[in-house]
């Protein structure tokens, strides 16, 4: 049998696979570009925030630091329950390490039941929504709460700098770099922004030389894309926005293929 004929089925299926991947990639990009009406998503976000807030009143209830910031952001975005935002912030303050010189300084206990910081990724997840809360909603907060939030975020920035995930730890490396840039910009700390840009460049170097070390993971892909899409939309410099957009395209392509 002619060797070129034998290769045709493989070539045919590869072409179909590539065509499907391209269609999936374009569809994903179109979905991102589409604006989801606020009124369509806010009720669900507020309902989830209500669930977190109710946990605070239940003795022994376990909640995570990440959900506290998510709930605060949901209430602020919906412009409801400023008193609950204050209560959620108080719970987050209690979960933050404020011991100067400690390895975990500025970081958070992942769960309320934890006696100390055990998962150093906590600050990265908390500061993602903390940066958005400060950037878009600080002026709507009462002065006392705004100052408390500023202090918590400033300490969180220390936690981000002190947490140095490996570039092979794909999702956390991207989350950490994105947080440093966006929170640094929001708080007016160019040194933190530069450090975030440096870490993003190191990640890109690893990606170029070795590829992504985390793949075929819906959980990790979600963190990757959320970090990159926020950076592509909100970073102050055109260069960083373009880099983030290119990286997002890479991960969408990886998912599609």
Image (spheres, helix red, strand yellow):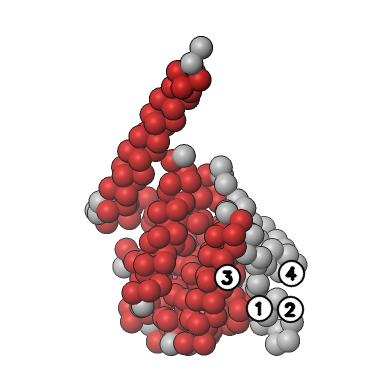
Q: Are marks 3 and 4 in contact (CB under 8 Å)?
A: no
Residue 151 image offset from top left, x and y in percent: 53, 85
Image position of 70 (left or right of 19): right
Q: Is residue 43 left or right of residue 162?
A: left
Tell which circle, 2 or 4, labels the residue nearer the N-terminal end: 2
Give the structural element (helix, strand or loop) at label 4.
loop
Q: Quadrant of residue 76?
A: bottom left
> Dot 4: few (<14), some (14–19), or many (≥20) neighbours within 10 Å?
some
Foreground tag (3 vs 4): 3
Q: Quick check: marks 1 and 2 in contact, CB under 8 Å?
A: yes
Frontmost residue, 80 versus 129? 129
Q: CA distance from mark 1 to mark 3?
A: 16 Å
Cβ atoms at labels 2 and 4 below 8 Å apart? no
Specify the label residue 116 is tagged with.
Answer: 4
Secondary structure beneath disc 3?
helix
Q: CA distance from mark 1 to mark 2?
A: 8 Å
Question: Which numbered marker is on residue 256?
Answer: none
Task: Work out which residue is located at the far top of the displayed protein and give it.
Answer: 1
How packed mark 2 is, by other alpha carbons closer than 10 Å (few <14, some 14-19, many 20 or more), is: some
Q: Which residue was labeled with disc 1? A: 162
Q: Residue at x 46, y 62 (%)?
A: 227
- Which residue is pictured at 70% across the width and 76% down the height? 104
Kind of element beneath mark 2: loop
What's the mark number on residue 103? 2
1 vs 3, front mark: 3
Residue at the disc numbered 3: 202
Residue 218 visible here:
yes
Q: Are marks 1 and 3 in contact (CB under 8 Å)?
A: no
């Amino acid at each position: 049998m002619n060797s070129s004929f034998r290769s045709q089925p493989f070539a045919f299926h590869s072409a179909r696979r590539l065509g499907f991947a391209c269609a999936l990639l374009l569809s994903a990009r179109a979905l991102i570009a589409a604006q989801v009406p606020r009124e369509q998503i806010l009720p669900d976000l507020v309902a989830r925030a209500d669930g977190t807030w109710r946990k605070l009143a239940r003795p022994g209830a376990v909640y995570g630091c990440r959900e506290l910031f998510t709930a605060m952001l949901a209430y602020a975005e919906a412009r409801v329950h400023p008193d609950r935002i204050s209560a959620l912030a108080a719970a987050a303050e209690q979960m933050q390490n404020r011991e100067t010189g400690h390895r975990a300084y500025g970081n958070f206990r992942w769960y309320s039941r934890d006696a100390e910081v055990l998962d150093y990724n906590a600050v990265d997840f908390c500061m993602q929504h903390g940066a958005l809360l400060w950037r878009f909603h600080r002026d709507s907060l009462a002065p006392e709460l705004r100052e408390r939030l500023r202090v918590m975020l400033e300490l969180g920035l220390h936690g981000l700098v002190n947490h140095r995930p490996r570039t092979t730890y794909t999702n956390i490396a991207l989350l950490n770099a994105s947080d440093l840039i966006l929170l640094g910009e929001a708080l007016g700390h160019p040194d933190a922004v530069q450090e975030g840009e440096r870490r993003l460049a190191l990640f890109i170097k690893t990606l170029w030389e070795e590829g992504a070390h985390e793949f075929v993971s819906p959980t990790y892909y979600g963190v990757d894309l959320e970090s990159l899409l926020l950076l592509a939309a909100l970073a102050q410099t055109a260069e960083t926005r373009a880099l983030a957009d290119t990286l997002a395209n890479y991960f969408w392509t990886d998912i599609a293929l």
